[in-house]
């Protein structure tokens, strides 16, 4: 079986370094908000190119805290609108609605799978306060026109970088393209912890200070609480592991890009559509999505032929029961993506032989 994601093999690549990092934490006797967090925050901020990085418990918390921070600063209020792609993972939407803000769903383009920037301006109303872009599948969702639109209307540009660690736009890494960004380090990510973990990056010192306090029960000083906060902390072992992994992120992404190039050059089945190929610096291939009108048949065929796959994602946010009030809405491009998408094996440990097996199975599907 060619695995979609082989975390055991990925971890084994630098296993001794991870063990040494975790042992260092054990020997220190300090497991939360210590030197490992400080080191990772500094190293990740430097890598991204921002002044601030705040380590938190997970990616959803990072997304929530961005907008909660703006609310505490008086820059967003209940009922304000946030423009967001209709085809994102549910976490992006949950973070908006948990803040009592209103998601305004905008269709992606079928060609690029990311939010259609040309449709954003027409979605802006007097209540619009921000745009949340999602670099889905590891593909860049930003362009210069988007930046100009946000400046023109005074909107906060927020990035969901859960799937795009290391992706670049004209020399600037995602996470530093807008006003602030949320990052997830779920184990399966390009930069993954050994459990849940996340971070916020920004150049806004006030926002960083507010978010750091909110994530620590609302406290900026021990036992003094300025905000009604939450407990959202990255563990010291995860910070130590992530700091090791960060050293290898760019090389890991290059291995993913090499695998993607092989797929683009050899997948030739007319029943299978591939997303438009873009520059490697604009795509770190967190996933390699393919599209087929007979997606479920294809998935079963691949399983029978030893290829593991996963659907990202079978049900779009506006069709989920938790947002049942939106169920009658129609977003045709989003629905087509969710109906036809299938992710094939994509990670830095897929061998040439395994890649050939994947391609052979795909091309033999009839």
Image (cartoon, rainbow, N blue to C red):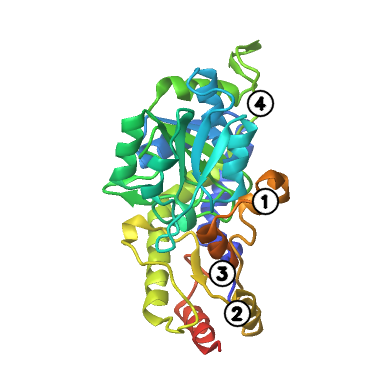
Q: Relative to residue 286, is residue 166 drawn left or right?
A: left
Q: Earlier in the sequence, mark 3 or mark 1?
A: 1
Q: Are marks 2 and 3 in contact (CB under 8 Å)?
A: no
Is residue 112 or residue 41 the one in the foreground?
112
Q: Residue at x 56, y 69 (%)?
A: 340
Q: Residue at x 60, y 12 (%)?
A: 226
Is residue 186 or residue 25 the one in the foreground?
186
> Which residue has dot 4 on it?
230
Q: Are marks 1 and 4 in contact (CB under 8 Å)?
A: no
**Measured along the vertical axis of the image, is residue 273 above or below residue 330?**
below
Q: Residue at x 29, y 38 (%)?
A: 148
Q: Which label number is shown at residue 298? A: 2
Q: Are marks 3 and 1 in contact (CB under 8 Å)?
A: no
In the structure shown, which secondary structural element does the residue marked by tag 1 occupy? loop
In the structure shown, which secondary structural element does the residue marked by tag 3 occupy? helix
Of badges 3 and 1, nearer the viewer stands: 1
> Which residue has dot 3 on it?
340
Residue 200, percent from left and from top: 49, 35
Q: How many neighbours does mark 1 have within 10 angstroms: few (below 14), some (14-19), or many (20 or more)?
A: some
Q: Is residue 211 visible?
A: no
Q: How many neighbours does mark 3 have within 10 angstroms: few (below 14), some (14-19), or many (20 or more)?
A: many
Q: Earlier in the sequence, mark 1 or mark 2?
A: 2
Q: How many neighbours does mark 2 have within 10 angstroms: few (below 14), some (14-19), or many (20 or more)?
A: many
What is the C-alpha distance between the residues marked 3 and 1? 19 Å
Residue 246, percent from left and from top: 44, 48
């Amino acid at each position: 079986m060619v695995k979609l994601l082989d975390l055991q093999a990925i971890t084994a690549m630098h296993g001794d370094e991870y063990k040494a990092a975790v042992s260092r934490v054990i020997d220190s006797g300090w497991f939360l908000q210590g030197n490992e967090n400080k080191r990772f925050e500094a190293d990740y901020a430097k890598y991204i190119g921002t002044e601030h990085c705040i380590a938190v418990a997970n990616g959803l918390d990072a997304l929530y805290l961005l907008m909660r921070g703006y609310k505490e600063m008086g820059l967003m209020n209940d009922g304000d609108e946030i423009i967001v792609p209709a085809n994102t993972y549910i976490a992006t939407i949950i973070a908006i609605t948990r803040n009592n803000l209103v998601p305004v769903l905008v269709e992606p383009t079928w060609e690029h799978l990311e939010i259609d920037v040309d449709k954003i301006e027409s979605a802006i109303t007097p209540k619009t306060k921000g745009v949340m872009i999602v670099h889905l599948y590891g593909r860049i969702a930003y362009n210069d026109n988007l930046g100009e639109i946000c400046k023109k209307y005074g909107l906060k540009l927020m990035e969901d970088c859960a799937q795009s660690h290391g992706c670049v736009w004209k020399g600037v890494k995602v996470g530093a393209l807008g006003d602030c960004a949320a990052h997830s380090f779920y184990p399966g990510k390009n930069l993954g912890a050994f459990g849940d973990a996340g971070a916020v990056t920004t150049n806004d010192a006030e926002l960083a200070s507010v978010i750091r306090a909110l994530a620590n029960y609302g406290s900026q000083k021990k036992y003094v609480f300025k905000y009604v906060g939450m407990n959202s902390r990255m563990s010291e072992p995860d910070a130590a592991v992530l700091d090791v992994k960060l050293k290898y992120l760019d090389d890991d992404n290059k291995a993913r890009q090499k695998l993607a190039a092989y797929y683009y050059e050899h997948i030739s089945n007319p029943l299978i559509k591939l997303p438009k190929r873009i520059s490697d610096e604009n795509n770190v291939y967190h996933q390699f999505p393919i599209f087929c009108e007979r997606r479920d048949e294809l998935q079963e065929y691949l399983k029978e032929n030893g290829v593991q796959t996963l659907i990202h994602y079978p049900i779009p946010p506006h069709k989920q029961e938790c947002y049942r009030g939106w169920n009658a809405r129609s977003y045709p491009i989003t629905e087509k993506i969710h109906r036809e998408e299938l992710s094939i094996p994509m990670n830095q440990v897929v061998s040439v032989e395994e890649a050939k097996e994947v391609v052979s199975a795909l091309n033999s599907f009839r």
